[in-house]
Amino acid sequence: MDPISALQEPFVQRAFIAITMASLVAGLVSLMIRYSQLQFLAVESFHALVAAAAVGYFVELFYPVSPELVAYLVMVGLLGFLNVLEGRVERLTAIAALSLSSATIISLFSFGLAQKSPFGSTIIYNILFGTPFLILQREVPYVVLAGSAMLLVLVALWKRILLLSFDPDYFAFIKGNNSFFLHRLFIYAMVAAAAVYLTKITGAVAAHVLLIAPSLAPFRQVSPVTVVLYALLVCYSAAFASIIFNLPYGAALGFFALLGYLLPAVIRRS
Amino acid sequence: MMSLEARGLSVSYGGVKALEDVTFSLRHPSSLIIVGPNGAGKTTLLKALLGMVDYEGELRVFGLEPRRDSQKLRQLVSYLPQASSVNQIVPLKVRDIVYSPQELAGESREAAERAIEITDIGGLLERRFSELSGGEKQRVLIARALAKRAKMLLLDEPFSMVDVGGREQIAELLLEAQRREGITLVIVSHDLSYFLKREPYVVLLNRRLIAFGMAQEVLTFQNLAKTYGIAKVGEVYFAGEEHGPY
Ligand SMILES: Nc1ncnc2c1ncn2[C@@H]1O[C@H](COP(=O)(O)OP(=O)(O)OP(=O)(O)O)[C@@H](O)[C@H]1O
Ligand SMILES: [Mg+2]
């Protein structure tokens, strides 16, 4: 499809609104993950993410609740489980335990989805590889509202997040243990919210890329501006590429995200 | 008035004792240097005094019980964590770091301004922390500790990353702050030579209390050998000897 006429299409416009919000959220949250040294968590969040979404859509078959809300709660539960484990066993063991329990949940609930719903396999496909071109008109206000709310909270607490990550011991001293714990919890809850939000817009595979890739890109200056710009460029290029070449969005996103990693290295060499 | 009183103080992490049956007390104002090998429980002792870890036994800081009255206690003390707790990926400017007690605990700006003056870091405020030299970094972190009004200052290895000339400077700065403000200084350090002329109290620690008292009474060859195990004693003893008769 020709990209200029595609932009006239309402479903394409909706996709661009959604990926703009997604890029802003992904940029800041991935930076927060980097600063608070939760990369391991982010890498492992994939299993939890798919598990949460599978439970969300399975529950929706029986109860009139938003699958995103259920997914968010499951995600918080799984990360909370990790948080509890981390105090007791080695960090890598805790993460492995999270991935094993998530894998079990994924398998059970996707099987349940496929059994109980005639669209089961489509739902599973969309959880994994969903695309922003499937955002419905009635969902747009929620996408914008939820994204703006996350951005507002992040911007308001940004300095605190930085101070907490810079020197956790000092932060715990000056705010007290309880407040320190709540702030850590806030960071986990924010990662969970962003993961579910991005999954809704791009599917879990691409959401996972967006949670990790922006802040780890090999820029000389990693800052909120460069990271958000990177996310925007990757998301927009992927959208255009998937329109022009009729590619799945996730594949295009992966390709451009990688290109963003390779280009700075090539430019620096020459 | 007593600033610190510990009786039978023990701290364990998951069943393993990091501190066992430690007893000592300290008047206010005075200075205390905590000395001991790696893993001796020095940081743990500071964290217990700050109410940041659970402990058994009796502990009072300015008459308060740290775990129970931690909120009140935080208003009376300031703290410099061990530099290894700092995560330098975070792109903070010196200004943001020094003013963190203002940002996080509503301290007065004058306290920060005075701390900047005392530590002489006015020229560094707009620089990135990660780009400073080791000594400059340590001065910034000390400024952050001083930017909070306090009756007691707890410093965990304020000399790490600092060369010999810088150590002298930092020690002077701390002792000067102590003299002017009448505060109690509690310092964990492997190098106590700079403080000896002010006759500090010393805690020798190796999970258990090896000795407590005035420096000249406590810093004997025997006690140091007991604290460190024989191999390291020559070094430490020498550091003390250089600066005085102990
Ligand atoms: N959060 C923790 N969880 C489990 N064990 C801990 C924890 N913090 C400290 N320890 C253990 O307690 C013991 C004392 O540690 P501490 O940090 O107090 O030693 P230290 O005297 O400050 O050593 P260093 O000179 O290396 O700073 C060590 O064996 C350490 O491994
Ligand atoms: Mg220590």
Image: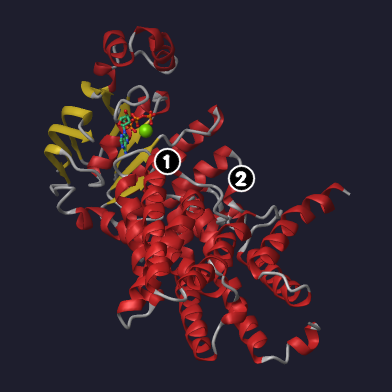
Instruction: State the residue lying farthest toward the right.
Output: A270
Residue B114 in view of the camera: no
Q: Nearer the viewer, mark 2 or mark 1?
A: 1
Mark 1 CB near ligand 1 (8 Å cut) = no
Quarter of the image where the N terminus of chain B is located: top left
- x then y, percent, for residue A55: 37, 67
For mark 1, name the chain: A
Q: Secondary structure at mark 1?
A: helix
Q: Quadrant of ligand 1?
A: top left
Q: Which residue is mark 1?
A: A92
User: Which residue, given by chain and number where applicable, does mark 2 sit on?
Assistant: B132
Q: Is residue A184 left or right of residue A121?
A: left
- Kindly identify which chain the residue marked by label 2 belongs to: B
| Quadrant, the C terminus of chain B | top left
Q: Are marks 2 and 1 in contact (CB under 8 Å)?
A: no
Query: In the figure, B214 relative to A131: above or below?
Result: above
How many neighbours does mark 1 have within 10 angstroms: few (below 14), some (14-19), or many (20 or more)? Answer: few
Three-letter amino acid code of the residue under disc 1: Leu
Residue type at numbered disc 2: Leu
> Tag 2, which secondary structure?
loop
Query: B199 or B32: which is nearer to us?
Result: B32
Rendering coords of residue B209 (x, y %): 21, 23
In the rendered image, residue B150, in percent from the top left (x then y), is placed at: 30, 52
Name which residue lies at 72% across and 63% down.
Answer: A256
Which image quarter: residue A179?
bottom left
- Give the crowd class for mark 2: few <14, some 14-19, many >=20 residues within 10 Å: some
User: Can residue B116 be seen at all in this image of the molecule?
Assistant: yes
